[in-house]
Amino acid sequence: MVDVRAAAARIAPYVRRTPVVDARPVRSGPAPGALALKLECLQASGSFKARGALNATLCLPVEARGRGLVTASGGNHGMGVAYAGWVVGVPTTVYLPRNTPAAKAARLRDWGARVVVEGDVWDDANRLAVEAAEREGLTYVHPFADPAVIAGQGTVAMELVEAVPTTRTIVAAVGGGGLVSGVALAAKALDPSVRVVGVEPTGAPTLYESLRAGRLIELPAIETAANTLAPRQSAQLNLELIGAYVDEIVLVSDDEMRAAARWLWAELCVPAELSGAASVAAVLAGRVPASPAAPVCAIVSGAGTDGMG
């Protein structure tokens, strides 16, 4: 928790303390008081990723920053790194897999990032980013298997628990596992009784299957449109943290995420991308029970409109 508090102080000038709102539906959904939303879709760069990317960048020696930053991303971490590079005034390169929406690539270029689109999935793009770091002398920023990134993401839970201390369950989407690792570490340190539930797509159950197997596994294929939740393999660091601190991982389908994104927009005017709606999908689908007696807070992790299509 010391690292998370240090990260919060370090990134405070550059990130938003995003609101936690009661999800009070007009027509349908959980009862008032049962579900709150931590709106990281309002975060600088459009997602929680700005927190971890900034913390990792600000922890780097000036010489390492000055060489320029490189990463691989489904889009959101790339935006976080591009934003961090803009904050500290260094160039950034982002490798994207071909399944990244064109709008995200365009936004990255708007932030001044050099964008390279190669590989079918994140794992392919990541291999190329690591090779580029070695070949060009750039500093690589991992999207989830980096203690500084994890500490930065943990600031989400620190804010959440401080804002709504009655929260009994926190729900977070899982891609590589950086968000849920940081959230679980921080939440359990502040209140060990809080449950932390991760949510993965049925078409990319990377950590769900790794936990079942008791070892890190690599999926043979990715079958989800939620590309920011779709690495074929996580990392040992995240597997160990999730195994120790996350209470459960549940799965949701793409259709359930789309329904949740539409519900968020129709009922609450919250524009969440497909992966950003995963946590809410788990609640609406009944995989994470929510009631006024056992309130849940779902992290709406990223903004977008792809989930409403």
Image: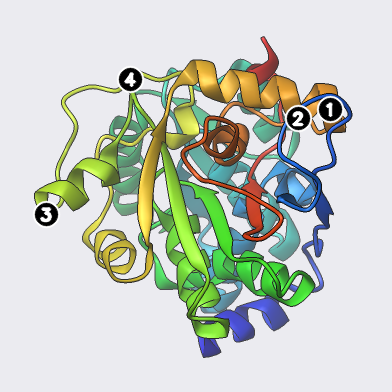
What's the amino acid at mark 1?
Glu
Sequence-first disc among 3 and 1: 3
Mark 4 burial class by Cα count in 10 Å: few <14, some 14-19, many 20+? some
SS at mark 1 in the image: helix
Camera-side mark, 4 or 2: 2
Which residue matches tag 3? Answer: 215
Does the rendering let one see residue 270?
yes
Give me the disc on residue 267. Answer: 1
Q: Position of residue 166 (x, y in %)?
A: 70, 71
Whether residue 221 sits left or right of residue 33 in the image: it is left
Does the rendering let one see residue 60?
no
Asked if the residue at tag 3 contacts the one at tag 2, i.e. Cβ–Cβ closer than 8 Å, the answer is no
Which residue matches tag 4? Answer: 120
Asked if the residue at tag 1 contacts the one at tag 2, i.e. Cβ–Cβ closer than 8 Å, the answer is yes
Asked if the residue at tag 1 contacts the one at tag 3, i.e. Cβ–Cβ closer than 8 Å, the answer is no
What's the amino acid at mark 3?
Arg
How far, Cα to Cα, is label 3 from label 1? 41 Å
